[in-house]
Image (cartoon, rainbow, N blue to C red):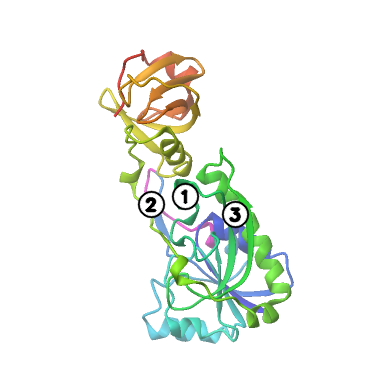
Amino acid sequence: MRIIFAGTPDFAATTLAALLTTEHEICAVYSQPDRPAGRGRKLTASPVKQLALQHHITVEQPLNFKQETDREKLARYQADLMIVVAYGLLLPQIVLDTPRLGCINVHASLLPRWRGAAPIQRAILAGDSKTGICIMQMEAGLDTGPVLQRAEIPIEATDTGEQLHDKLAKLGADTLLETLNNFEQLQAKASPQNDAESCYAAKLQKAEANIDWLQSALQIDRQIRAFNSWPVAQTLWQDKMLRIWNAAMIDHHDPKAIPGTIIQIDRDGIDIATGDGVIRVLTLQAPGKKAMPVRDFLNAHVLKAGDHFG
């Protein structure tokens, strides 16, 4: 098939890399405009754009598809199919109708659960036991189209957002290639979603990273795992904002301990009381420093039982 690929971050680049190993023709790649990145805020191409240029594929970067000239350019590629993976734009119906076989999306959830921008992290935060990939025929609504193919994996008790992202990126690429091998038959049998079962995976906000120690250890553990590697769970300590990268729930109960209080410290972890249970912090980061295990953090900072976080 003659394919247009639309995507922006690493998650999408994994799928593009897999497509490049097939006999399908990638006639163009669409990606978000270059954005400032890093300490110098230098304009930086997306991972998808970088990969496309390495393979000498034409890259288009419209701000949106409101301009007729951008829509006409898309049509001139005469694509059979447009594959969209974490592109970052809602596509209007006129764009969805342009390729001969329409547009499909590789989405990182078991639709209709977790429609929206952050399905991976929301699934961890909610305590879901499984997640997966859906290949969906795109409609004008947000992740509402019928599903051609799905694949699921368990969410392990220790999975972080980054780890689950990487698992789903590979699963998404593999599932897409399977779908393309039998595409028109699967398209004809696509299953409509039940809107009544849907929930919204809102974009992550930095404010969500602030730990409320009144919550249970279970919920805080999910928060720390979900927000690794962005925006990273954080808490105040001596007027400093510490980022907590890794932690674990432990079997310990002290009903007299005030949530947020350190109840025990050793070089393997810092045990902190919560509203229900205890969290052992394993890896943390001081402002301006790298993330480090507790044993290294204690070499440069003095903490003691009774100190308070938050």
Which residue is depicted at the point 54% across and 55% down?
Answer: 10
Label 3, on which residue?
168
Which mark identifies residue 121?
1
- From this view, report whether residue 172 is shown above or below residue 216: below
- From this view, report whether residue 160 is shown above or below residue 103: above
- In this view, the residue in front, 138 or 200, is 200
Q: Position of residue 21 (x, y in %)?
A: 72, 64
Mark 1 Cα within 10 Å, few/some/many (few <14, many 20+)?
Answer: many
Q: Is residue 44 magenta?
A: yes
Q: Position of residue 74 (x, y in %)?
A: 50, 82
Which residue is depicted at the point 37% across and 45% down?
Answer: 40
Instruction: Look at label 1 and name its amino acid.
Output: Gln
- For the C terminus, the image quarter is top left
Residue extent of the magenta highlight: 39-49
Q: Is residue 260 magenta?
A: no
Label 2, on which residue?
204
Q: CA distance from mark 1 to mark 3?
A: 12 Å
- For the N terminus, the image quarter is bottom right
Q: CA distance from mark 1 to mark 2?
A: 8 Å
Mark 2 / mark 3, whichever is N-terminal: 3
Question: Could you say which quadrant of the image residue 189 lies in?
Answer: bottom right
- In this view, the residue in front, 296 or 217, is 217
Question: Does residue 50 appear in this view?
Answer: no
Q: Position of residue 55 (x, y in %)?
A: 64, 64
Query: At numbered mark 1, what does the secondary structure look like: helix, strand or loop?
Result: helix
Mark 1 in CB contact with mark 2 (< 8 angstroms): yes
Q: Position of residue 61 (x, y in %)?
A: 45, 70
- In this view, the residue in front, 177 or 225, is 225
